[in-house]
Each structure stands twice: as C-alpha cells, then as structure tokens.
Image (tube, coloured by chain):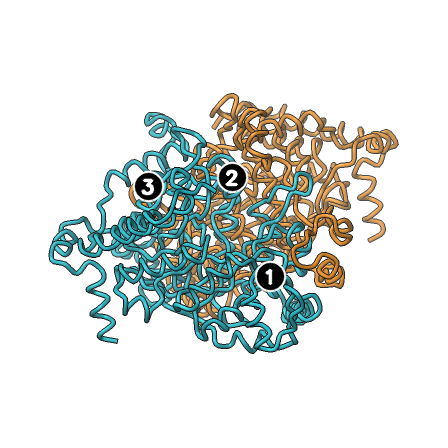
Chain colours: A orange, B cyan
Amino acid sequence: MSEAAADRRRGRGGGGAARRAERSAPKLEAAKYIERKIPNLEILSDEALEIIEANAETVLEEIGVNFVENPEALKRWKDVGADVNGERVRFPKGLLRSLIKTAPSSFIQHARNPERSVEIGGKSLVLAPVYGPPFVWDSVGGRRYATMADFQKFVKLGYMSKWLHHSGGTVCEPTDIPVNKRHFDMLYAHMSLSDKPFMGSVTEPSRAQDSVDMCKILFGEDFATNNTVMTSLININSPLTFDATMMGALEVYAANNQACIVSPFIVGGAMAPVSVMGTLTQVLAEVMVAVAYSQMIRKGAPVIFGAFVTSIDMNSGAPTFGTPEAAQITYGAGQLARRLNLPYRSAGSFNGSKLPDAQAAYETSNSLNMGLLSGVNFMLHACGWLEGGLAASPEKFVLDADQLGVLHHLAAGVPIDENAQAMDALREVGPGGHFLGCAHTQANFKTAFWKTNVLDYKPYETWVDEGSRDSVALAAARVDKMLSEYVQPALDPAVDEALKAYIAQRKSGMPDAFI
Amino acid sequence: MSEAAADRRRGRGGGGAARRAERSAPKLEAAKYIERKIPNLEILSDEALEIIEANAETVLEEIGVNFVENPEALKRWKDVGADVNGERVRFPKGLLRSLIKTAPSSFIQHARNPERSVEIGGKSLVLAPVYGPPFVWDSVGGRRYATMADFQKFVKLGYMSKWLHHSGGTVCEPTDIPVNKRHFDMLYAHMSLSDKPFMGSVTEPSRAQDSVDMCKILFGEDFATNNTVMTSLININSPLTFDATMMGALEVYAANNQACIVSPFIVGGAMAPVSVMGTLTQVLAEVMVAVAYSQMIRKGAPVIFGAFVTSIDMNSGAPTFGTPEAAQITYGAGQLARRLNLPYRSAGSFNGSKLPDAQAAYETSNSLNMGLLSGVNFMLHACGWLEGGLAASPEKFVLDADQLGVLHHLAAGVPIDENAQAMDALREVGPGGHFLGCAHTQANFKTAFWKTNVLDYKPYETWVDEGSRDSVALAAARVDKMLSEYVQPALDPAVDEALKAYIAQRKSGMPDAFI
C-alpha cells in the first residue's frame, strides 16, 4: 500500500514546478462527499419488497433477457449454468443472487488529488454533474449545439463548485469534435482542468480501453491497475436487453477493476410497465443480470445498482421529471439496492423545462430531495440538466450546485451536544428579548446556517435598484465570476506531455467519423 | 347527530333555488385531503427528543413566559398551580403536560359543503393557501398593495384548485378596506365564493366573535355550536411571549369549540437560538403553554401544534426559506407534536424570491416536500407565497397548487396488488419490446401518473412556435382560464341575506379605522 501511495503521489503532479503552482493557487472550497446522518425514507413494506424480488426471479427464469451480438457473453452465461437459447438467456432462480455476492458494498474512487477521492456506497452520497446533453442553453445565446469549449466550461464550473464531488463524464456532447475522437478530448479536459474524480468513455469497448490507458498515464500504471480511478455509466437497453457496445465497455472496465453503474434506462409506460411495482420488478431483474455479469468478468469489480427512471406524459409520450411516480420508483429501488448490499445510483437535477424557470426548479428540487432521502450513493446529473436532458445550462448548473449545499446541511443531521442545546441562550435572552446579540449566537452564527452563493435575499427596494434580476440573471453573473476566478489545478508537465502524446498518436491512426 | 346533520343541510344552501343552481353548475374536481400511506421521516433520535422535552420543562420552570396585559389569564394560571410573578408565569414540571392531555389528537373541520370537510390530525394532510401578504405580485402589474378584488380572486382560485382542501384565511390583506372592517368582507368572500373550509379573524377578540357569529348564520346556530367550523391562526410572540390580542382571540375560539393553530413565529437566530435543538426546545415550551391555555378555556377544544420557523441570512438579517436548518426544525417539531398526540401545522410554499422564478420554486419545493415528509397535518401557505410572505401571486398560486398534486400522489403510496405487479405486461412485451400498446398499459394509463395542469412537456420546436413561454406565462394563462370558468357555489339566498344584514349592521356601528 505504501508503494501504491508513493506511486499515487508521483502520478499526480509530483514535480517541483507543479507543487509551486499549487501553492500559489487560491485555496479552493471543496466539500467532502456527503456522509448521511439522517435516515432514508423507506416507502415500501417488506411484503412489497419480497413480492418484487420473487417476481424478478420469475421474470429472469421464465422470460429471460437478450444479450445481443455478443457470443462471448452467451458462452459465459452457459458456463455458469444459465439457459441460453439463441440470444435469449434465462436464469435458474438464485443463480444471479449467488453470482452478485462478490460485488463490493462500497468502494473508493480515487481522484488525482487524494483529497477529492470519494467513497461510493454505505451512507455516502457523491454528486456528479449532468451527463449527455447534445445542446447547451445559456441566457446569452439561447439553445444551440454544444461544443468542446462548452464542455471545458462545465468542467471548470464543476471544479469550482464547492458542493460537487465529481467531475462527471460527458457533461455535454462536444459536437464539434468527431464522434470517434471526442472521448480523448473529454477525458483530457477532466484530467487537466479538474482534480476531481471522473468517468470513462462507454461508447465503444476500444474507447473504454483508451480511458483505462489514459488513467494509467495520469495515475501511474501500478496505481491505476490496483485501484478504482473511474466510474462509468453502462445503460441497459430496457426492457431486458443488453447490447454489445455497452456490455463490451463493461467488460473492459470490470476486467480492469474500474467501476460501472449498470443502469436500466426507463421511461415508465414505454420501456417498463406503467406501474411502480412492475417497473421495480424489471429494474431489479435487469440490474441483477448486469451486476452478475460484471462479477463473471472479474470477481469483486465495483459495480453500482443504477436506476434512471422517469414517468411519461401519456398524451404526448414525452418523459416527465420530478413526478411522484418517479419518486416512488426511486425510493423503492434504493430499498432493493440496499437489500442487495450494492451502492445505488439515481436521481439528479431532472426537469423537462426549456428554461431554468420555476418549472425547472420545482422538478429539480423534487428530484434532489428524493435523491438524498432514497439513499442514493452516486447522483449523476446532480446539476446543470435542462429540457429532459437535451440541454445543459451553465446558469442551471450553478443554481443546482448551490442547492446541493442544502442536501449537505440537511444530511449532516442535528448536533445535540450542550452547545447545540443552547440553554444558556434561552436563559440569557428570556421572554420578549432577541437572540441576535446574545453570546451563543455570536459564537455560532458563522456555521449555523447554510449560505447560498447565488440566490437573492435582499429587501425589495435594493433588489429593484440592482436591476430586478431574476434567478437566471443572478446565475449568469455567478457563472462569469466563477470562470474569471478559475485557476487550473497543477499537473506534472511530464504527465501532461504523456497524455497529449497518447492522444495525438491514437487520433492520428483513425479518420474522422461523425456518426 | 341526525338533528345536527339535518340542521347542517339546512344551513348550507338547502333552498330549492340553490339546489337547482348547484345541479346546473359544472362538476368541480376536488381531491380529498391527503391520507398518508407513506411513513414520515424521523430525523431526531429518541435521545434527542427526550433532551428537548426535558430542556423545555426546565425553560418553563426556570424562565417561564410572559402573558402580557392579560390579568384574566394570569388568574387562570394561578388557579391551576402555576407560579405567577407580575406578568411572568412559571410552570412546575409536568403541569402543562397534564393539562394538554384533553386536547384531541384529531378533529373534523366542517365545510358548508360536507364533501369538503377535512380531518386534521393523524395521518391526514390538509392544504390551505398563503396567509397574510400585504402585497400582490402578478405578471401584468408587478408588485402593488393588495385589494379586496385580489382577495376575491385568490378565494376563487382556491375554490377551483383541485389539490387545495381549504380556502384559508387572509389570503392577502385587502388594504382598500378599513382595518377594523376587513374581517367581515374576508369572511363573506370565503363563505360565499367558496364552499371549502376557512379560517376566522384573530386580529381582535371582537373579530373572533364576529367570525363565530357569522358561522352561526352560515352553518346554523346548533351546528356551529356543536361542531368545529373554523381553524384560526394564533401566532405566539416568540420568544416566550403571549400577547392579549392573540390570546383573546384564542379564548373566544376555544370557548366556542373552534380550532386554533398555536404557532411560534420564529426567524431562527433572532426570535430563537441559532441552533436546531435550541429552537425546538423553545418551540415545544411555547406550544405547550398555548395548548394548555386552550384546554383551561375549554377542555377538548381542538388545537394544533404550530411551528412557523425560518432561518436567517446572518449578513442582512433577512429571513431565508427552503433551507436545510428550517427543514431540520420542521422534521423535529413534527416528531415532538406526535409525541404529544397533537395535530401538527408547518411548512408551505415558502420562498424569499421577488418573482415566481427558479429561486422561488427551489425554495418552495424544498418546503413542500419536507412538509409532506415531516408529518404536517395542516399546511398553511401551501400555495401562492412570494417574497418572504410580503406578496401573494396568482401565478405562483397556480404553479404551487399544481405541485400539491405531486404530494397527493406521492403520499398515496404504492399499490402492490396483482394488477400493480404487472407480470402479464412483462410476459406480453418481453426483451426489446415496448409497453405503450400492451394490454396492461391500456388498462391503467389513465390513472397511472399524476398530470400537471400548467407545466410544459412539449417538444422544443412546438414550444418555440407557441411563443417560448416560461412558467410564469404558462401560469398567467392558467389563472385566466380558471377565473373564466369559475361558477359561484350555490348558497341559500336566505343565508346570504342574513350574512349581509349582519355585516351591514356591525359595520354601521363603527367608524373606519386604517391602523
């Protein structure tokens, strides 16, 4: 372990120049990942959970799942005793439950700055930004296709956001870069513009391998081989289908002991039954297959029980966010994940609005609160999501990231020591007095309350004098301020050169592709 | 009881003309009050709760409270064994806990339309609109002083809002009516423009008596004497002070078996200690005094454990809403109320924003979700609140009221019967299929998901074609639609005449007062 630690230091900007740069940079405020001191909300009874578990086993045995265009996977399933017929795989009851026992209940994802490493599982909650939008919306330019410049801006905002623990992955799609080369530039942005943990590419098994290889350069080969340094998103083609691309990426990551979120992607009523119980049954069945598969690749490989679930507007077919049915599924899936002793991924700054307006915020808050209380361990999309995930927005990003502070303070629980009991204050002030000046308030006010960095509490007249700014205008100003204060975290120039050389060499071998 | 029921029918528009008008009016969608089928979130340990309870008894014994300008109250306290010194009242440990035992854990507040009567207590949640703002903000006129016309508009919107169970009280301050005559017009608006339950006046004991007398006209004397037909808001002058106006109103209501919310009004750090435990100690002490006092007036009078608690921005002194510390206090106060076996009032559409923008919605959603999960039984301010309660907004009203549907669906819990398990759907669709057309979806889609009445789920291009409307614009259109469809609920013309005559007679006896 000491060898690994030494290697880790070497791999993360150990050069003298880097150390000097680091010392001169302003100290960044960065909260530790949340360690919950409040309980989860358990909305399903044991009876309901046992029904779901029994029904999921029935689905797996009777209906089974398809592993598409993946003969190697079919062979693996046959070898462990599954019933394989064409691409359909059926599972004797209990087989998957037995296979997934080797998956860890919790793991550390290391960042190149050890202070930013996160624990995923148990009572922890790690917050990561929006993932995947092809568009960007901002208050200056409106909605347009996202570019690499946007991507870099979001990585910088993520790095500067106190309550965000993770740099994420595809914070937006850099549509100005060829599809087959994007992953290099995205990874390099996370590696060089931030020192928080990040996600790898999943759009091709070869890109997953590039991600692993770049991490070996960034962290040092030994460290990256012996530790988990990426958490990547493997979507399941619900219902009950596992495609070769996603499974291929999972195979690369699991073989390299890198973490995967295995996540049914469900618009309820379309990709799963229209009921909460039915959807949870399918989610559990799908996740059990994917987790078991990861353990067949490498026992002990870290893997997260994912659930991306929205409801649907039955008039238009549009996915809907922040809804009560999505909340019920998220709460229930959390209970199922805990019963499997697996880390849980769900929730986010979900909303269907085209603008960072009231709708966006209602739906987002509903989802963020539910995410905290459903026991989520890894929350992707925790800030910046707009328009059903079609757009990422810098203004929404900083507004949401501010609200993530609310989750931190709420999760911290209530201190009950003598100072917290404040009996001296009650005695000092007495009936009809006021507490602003009392000794207890003076001693505690600085840490007593969560503080916003963007919302407005000013008197009406002051607010009018300052231009009657709404949340979007306040957020736009906050974005500008953060970007103007951004200082790149130090990176060993030799590591930086090696990353650039790897990318140049790999890119030169392939023609541009835009599909 | 059958006599009361007959009287009740008579008292609520039993005339033939009224019945005919009712039959021709369009059927109004009105949800029953929420009966929770999900658990509450209990964030405080038994140890913490016991510390608070012990400390509250110490506060009551050592520090005591002031009953200001109320010699009758002081005499009552002396009579039950409290230690009275000037206006300061101290309580031997256990006295209050013994006195409050006669307060009911749950009660029915009757509406003139029996279908709108509500149960307050137990697992119920009754939602009532914003209370008290002197200003109105709307998207046409901006911010201005509220008038009686605004008041009537809010009562109509409340009547038309499916998820709102209660018409409320001072939905805004009708500043164009003399202060000493407002309560007549406000009560008459609730009585005539809506058939939902409502609140009485508390700004003078005589106005409380007017409220009682008007209810005797509306409901019939026997019915109003034998049943609870008003729930009114008695704020406590925190810290630890009970003024003669509010206590005088409480005396009138309790004597008439009408319900009171006794509610510490606390900006944390100013009117209570800066810590959660300290604030909860004070809240509990204050509520116990007020509940006990109500039972000294009349054993069994319905009374609600209230907690209006916000945090504070320590830079400006402004109250702040939707914050984690306010949430912790609200969760904790709910636990304390349940341990006293009392109905609980807290939470609401709280926010500090000047506009119904993202800030308003984040803060509101935080508070609404916490209100549901903290076990609130009566939620005042559940819609329409803006700018820290200084303004009421029609747009915010309908946006919030729509979100109240989210609370209903979430609280309804998860059905687990065979239809809900949806195994037939899973068997019918199978891997790679889709559920939109399957039999289970067809049979269930109409009731499967909560539906918004105001938010936008349309594709981006359609949304642009329709004018790129934000939430405020969508809400303004919703307000116009609701008001255009409003039909006044039938009221027995004789009752209506009697109410008008009472008001005219009472008003004629007093000169206008504007302070």
Compare marks 3 and 1 and give the one earlier in the sequence: 3
- Reading the chain from its start, which is encountered first: label 3 or label 2? 3
Q: Earlier in the sequence, mark 2 or mark 1?
A: 1
Chain letter of disc 2 in the image: B
Closer to the camera, B264 or A238? B264
Mark 3 Cα within 10 Å, few/some/many (few <14, many 20+)?
A: some
Q: What's the amino acid at mark 3?
A: Lys
Q: Which residue is denoted by mark 1 in the rendering?
A: B283
Mark 3 falls within which chain? B
From the viewer's perspective, is residue B396 above or below residue B420?
above
> Callout 2: helix, strand or loop?
helix
Q: CA distance from mark 3 to mark 1?
A: 35 Å
Relative to residue A124, is residue B478 drawn left or right?
left
Amino acid type at image mark 1: Val
Which residue, given by chain and number where applicable, does mark 3 sit on? B153
**Which numbered tag is attached to residue B387?**
2
User: In the drawing, does residue B345 fall left or right of residue B319?
Assistant: left
**A487 vs B183: above or below:** above
Q: In x, y percent, where is residue A368?
A: 53, 48
